[in-house]
Image: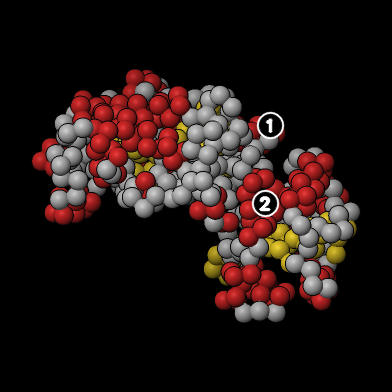
């Protein structure tokens, strides 16, 4: 937890961004896995963590814009709670830790909302993404659940995005800790990757590292020999000679700040010529993004530059024909990379996307493209100092997509489908790092950088655990 001053200043800044009314910041509740007392691992709402810092279920924070006042609503723990969980601090004591002087039982929240509504004051809340919180908001406002989405406060959403997306120095320190755990996870995967291993053996070890060093994984890891499937959460394949293993995994530190890295490695420890050629095209794009990213540029433009770089590399390998820049601008490279270059990262691995992906990634200046591939870019707007983003180009050979484009003659003037079909059993390669944007460039996050070049990866794989 940060100092209570940090949370007080964050809430003050948010009040200053808003004109009037009360702001409701919902914390999360426990979520049952298969019966009420067997719950999933608790994860607090990230905006609640940002403004109120408390990592317990059943809490709601209210920020009174007009009266310069904050309050936490939650019920004190009962004797039964103490029997099962041990002696616990009171809600008032917890509130004091984050600079909040007023606390009330949760049933008092309805009175506060009713009083504000009767006075004609605006009631601001963020879009709830859990059903129990949708029900809570609907009950507080006396509306149907289906009406909740239309009552979300755009003013609050925009204010929170503007505030949360620029990371402070103390936040960068926390993200760095998560990245350091990510380093340990990925270098361990490189050492474990050998023929005969099963994907779940590596995945389970990575999750164990994230729990040993922090709050667990920041998302369900992708650990697969079928890297051409972008979000592959099946872990039952056995690693075999000649295949590559794609590992997309990150960690949350103890304050729930996230990391997100991807590396791709040869199962037998040595890249084939064919694998290395494609790998180096992806690597070149990854390195270009690090070279050119800086405040003032849009990430959409940087995505396009990465496509051009991959277009040049694919042209040299004979997979793309004609002018590689023209091919990239006409969407041909998207057959090989149908996803976006990256996303924001912070308290969420896809930071703030619960508030609306387009609102987080785009603005009045930068509109989302409708072009296949480029339209999948989650973060496209102008970069500012303090933005934390991912840099994750990739090249994938997706048989069904290749067949569709070939049959429909999509970008046929730019793609040599006969050559591409020699790669149908290739899989996919993605290389991902986290970047902190600065005024004149960017820095790669983490105290140690995960092996990235083919030689670095092979060297790491040759080490013993």
Name, please, the residue furthest toward the left.
418
Picture coordinates of residue 434, whole percent (x, y): 51, 34
Q: Position of residue 288 (x, y in %)?
A: 40, 26
106 left or right, relative to 226: right
| Depth order, front residue of 146/100 | 146
- Residue 458 in view of the camera: no
Q: CA distance from mark 2 to mark 1?
A: 20 Å
Placement of 119 over or under 344, stated as above or below: below
Residue at the spot x=16%, y=54% of the render?
A: 408
- State the residue in front, 441 or 79: 441
Q: In the rendered structure, find residue 169 and report the number of the disc placed on it.
A: 1
437 or 95, nearer to the observer = 437
> Measured along the vertical axis of the image, is residue 276 above or below residue 28?
above
Task: Tally the numbered discs.
Answer: 2
The local crowd at label 1, few if under 14, some if 14 to 19, many if 20 or more residues have their Cα within 10 Å, is few
Give the class, few, some or many, for how many residues have Cα within 10 Å of label 2's Cα (few <14, many ≥20): some
Query: How is the rendered protein coloured?
Result: secondary structure
Where residue 339 is drawn, which disc sits there? Answer: none
Residue 145 in the image: state x and y as whole percent: 60, 76
Residue 235 rendering spot, x and y as whole percentages: 37, 49
Q: Residue 57 is drawn in which quadrant?
A: bottom right
Q: Report the quarter where the C terminus lies.
A: top left
User: Which residue is tagged 2?
Assistant: 159
Q: Is residue 369 visible?
A: yes
Q: Which quadrant of the view contains residue 110? A: bottom right
Q: Which numbered mark, 2 or 1, is in the foreground of this view?
A: 2
> Where 142 sits versus 156, above or below?
below
Could you tell me which secondary element the residue under label 2 belongs to? Answer: helix
Q: Nearer the viewer, residue 24 or 227?
A: 24
Q: Residue at x 47, y 33 (%)?
A: 433
Can you say which quadrant of the picture contains the N terminus?
top right
């Amino acid at each position: 937890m940060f100092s209570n001053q940090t949370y007080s200043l964050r809430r003050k800044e948010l009040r200053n961004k808003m004109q009037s009314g009360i702001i409701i910041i919902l914390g999360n509740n426990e979520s049952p896995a298969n019966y009420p007392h067997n719950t999933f691992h608790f994860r607090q709402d990230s905006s609640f963590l940002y403004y109120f810092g408390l990592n317990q279920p059943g809490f709601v924070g209210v920020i009174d814009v007009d009266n310069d006042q904050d309050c936490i609503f939650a019920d004190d723990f009962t004797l039964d709670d103490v029997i099962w969980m041990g002696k616990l601090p009171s809600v008032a004591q917890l509130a004091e830790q984050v600079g909040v002087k007023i606390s009330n039982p949760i049933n008092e929240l309805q009175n506060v909302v009713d009083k504000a509504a009767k006075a004609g004051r605006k009631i601001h809340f963020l879009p709830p993404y859990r059903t129990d919180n949708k029900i809570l908001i609907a009950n507080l406002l006396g509306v149907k659940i289906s009406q909740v989405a239309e009552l979300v406060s755009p003013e609050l959403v925009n204010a929170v995005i503007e505030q949360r997306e620029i990371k402070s120095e103390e936040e960068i320190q926390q993200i760095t800790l998560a990245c350091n755990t990510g380093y340990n996870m990925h270098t361990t995967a490189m050492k474990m990757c050998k023929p005969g291993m099963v994907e779940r053996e590596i995945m389970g070890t990575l999750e164990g590292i994230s729990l040993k060093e922090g709050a667990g994984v920041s998302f369900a890891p992708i650990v697969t020999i079928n890297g051409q499937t972008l979000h592959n959460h099946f872990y039952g394949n056995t690693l075999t000679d000649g295949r590559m293993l794609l590992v997309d995994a990150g960690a949350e530190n103890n304050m729930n700040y996230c990391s997100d890295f991807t590396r791709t490695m040869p199962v037998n420890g040595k890249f084939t010529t064919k694998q290395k050629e494609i790998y180096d095209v992806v690597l070149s794009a990854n390195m270009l993004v690090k070279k050119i990213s800086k405040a003032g540029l849009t990430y959409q433009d940087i995505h396009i530059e990465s496509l051009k770089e991959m277009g040049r590399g694919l042209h040299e390998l004979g997979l793309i024909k004609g002018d590689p820049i023209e091919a990239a601008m006409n969407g041909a490279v998207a057959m090989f990379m149908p996803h976006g270059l990256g996303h924001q990262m912070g308290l969420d691995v896809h930071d703030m996307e619960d508030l609306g992906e387009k609102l987080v990634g785009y603005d009045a200046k930068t509109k989302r493209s409708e072009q296949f591939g480029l339209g999948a870019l989650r973060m496209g707007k102008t970069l500012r100092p303090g933005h934390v983003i991912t840099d994750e180009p990739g090249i994938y050979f997706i048989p069904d997509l290749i067949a569709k484009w070939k049959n429909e003659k999509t970008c046929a003037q730019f793609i040599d489908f006969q050559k591409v079909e020699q790669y149908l059993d290739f899989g996919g390669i993605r290389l991902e790092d986290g970047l902190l944007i600065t005024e004149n460039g960017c820095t790669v996050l983490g105290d140690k950088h995960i092996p990235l070049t083919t030689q670095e990866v092979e060297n790491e794989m040759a080490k013993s655990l």
